[in-house]
Amino acid sequence: MFAAAALLLLAGIGRFAWFLASAPGSGSRTQVIEVVQGFSLKRIAANLENGRIISSARLFLLYARLRGADSRVKAGPYQFSDAMPPTAILRMMVAGEVYVHRFAIPEGYSIYQVAELLESRNLFRKEAFLKQCTNPALLRELGIAARSVEGHLYPSTYDIPPNMDEAGFIRLAAEQFDKVYTQRYAVRAKALGLPEKEVVTLASMVEKEAIQPAERPLVASVFLNRLRRGMRLQSDPTAVYGVRAFAGTVSKQDILRPSPYNTYLIKGLPPGPIGNPGGEAIEAVINPARTDYLYFVARKDGTHYFSANLDEHNRAVRKYLRTASSDGSATGYRNDYPSLTGRR
């Protein structure tokens, strides 16, 4: 009888050891399980067994208790596969290795570009995201006195849990912008008499125009010099904002298109940002280069040639673009005012 009991004990130990070292599947089955604060480990183990991620809720619970981990599991969403041994599953939940999608907002991307990127990664639908970007209730909650969150989604990498919706992601990125702007730029901008909206709007234009990061302060100086002189800003990216992504060039049709953002047709700044600028672009607006430049033209290497007067600018256009017209304007067609970049 003693021998039989010993054999049963050994069999039980063997089964337990096999359970801990093995997995019920090959990895073809995955499941995201939400561990809610207050859930008992017994309930969590039952969910894992029902999802066929572990073969025995009872043995899993026994293992967790032997490890003293039954009260140390952290809340959150976890993704498990049936190829994971129970030891790895418990370790993840104790360590709090929750399942998230990582998503980076690139510097300068508009809400429209961000929406397309999110949809391409199967995170959010483009239409649903853009709807929340202009949700008046959400804008009030975030303290954004504008028609959209444009300019307030800070370019960074974010962890998006499976249960986060479009509004939640916007809150995350907008709160990061508010934190960064308040800590790094708000005091200096206020001392210079620059409202946040103007800083962010200018920075969004600088971000689109300056291909080389080192040129951001120079591009900012051009826009600020033009504003002081009452000149139109004539920024190419503003002419296509809300129509398509800026890819370096615009057409005559683009710059003649009526739009409150088109700085070829309006005076001063657009009514709001045309993208979401990063910290360096914001810094460039608050601390621009001290120049008398009013124009710049793109070289083939991605840098720009900056000019202080129209004659110099037209010479640069002929040298780098070879598109100056016979009537002396800086572009291939007649303007009532000189072009900023000569790229048109």
Image: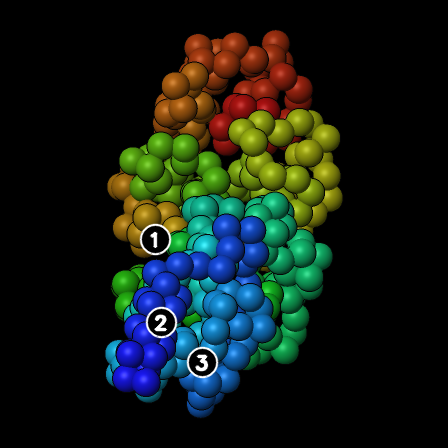
Colour pattern: rainbow
* Label 2: element kind: helix
Say above or below: 146 vs 294: below
Q: Position of residue 210 (x, y in %)?
A: 41, 36
Look at the image and tell me in which quarter the C terminus lies: top right
Q: Nearer the viewer, mark 1 or mark 2?
A: 2
The quarter in which the N terminus is drawn is: bottom left
Depth check: 38 or 155 in front?
38
Q: Percent position (x, y) of residue 241?
A: 62, 45
Could you tell me if residue 188 is visible in this image? yes
Query: Residue 236, image x and y in percent?
Result: 56, 35
* Marks 3 and 1, the one that precedes in the sequence: 3
**Residue 195, quarter of the rendered image:** bottom left
Residue at 63% in and 17% down: 332
The span from disc 1 to disc 2 (Cα, nearest Å) is 63 Å
Q: Are marks 1 and 2 in contact (CB under 8 Å)?
A: no
Between discs 3 and 2, the one toward the N terminus: 2
Residue named by callout 2: 11
In this rendering, is residue 337 above or below 9? above
**Crowdedness of circle 1 by 10 Å Cα count: few (<14), some, many (20+)?**
some
For this orientation, the residue located farthest to the front is 1
Along the line of sight, the residue nearer the viewer: 265 or 66: 66
Distance between the alpha carbons at the discs numbered 3 and 1: 53 Å
Residue underneath mark 1: 279
Q: Which mark is residue 58?
A: 3
Is residue 64 at least partly visible in the picture? no
Dot 2 amino acid type: Ala
Q: Label 3 is placed on what type of residue?
A: Arg
Tell me the amino acid under the disc marked 1.
Answer: Gly
Q: Position of residue 218 (x, y in %)?
A: 33, 37
Mark 2 crowd level (few <14, some 14–19, many ≥20, 10 Å Cα): few
Residue found 56% across the figure and 56% down from its top: 29
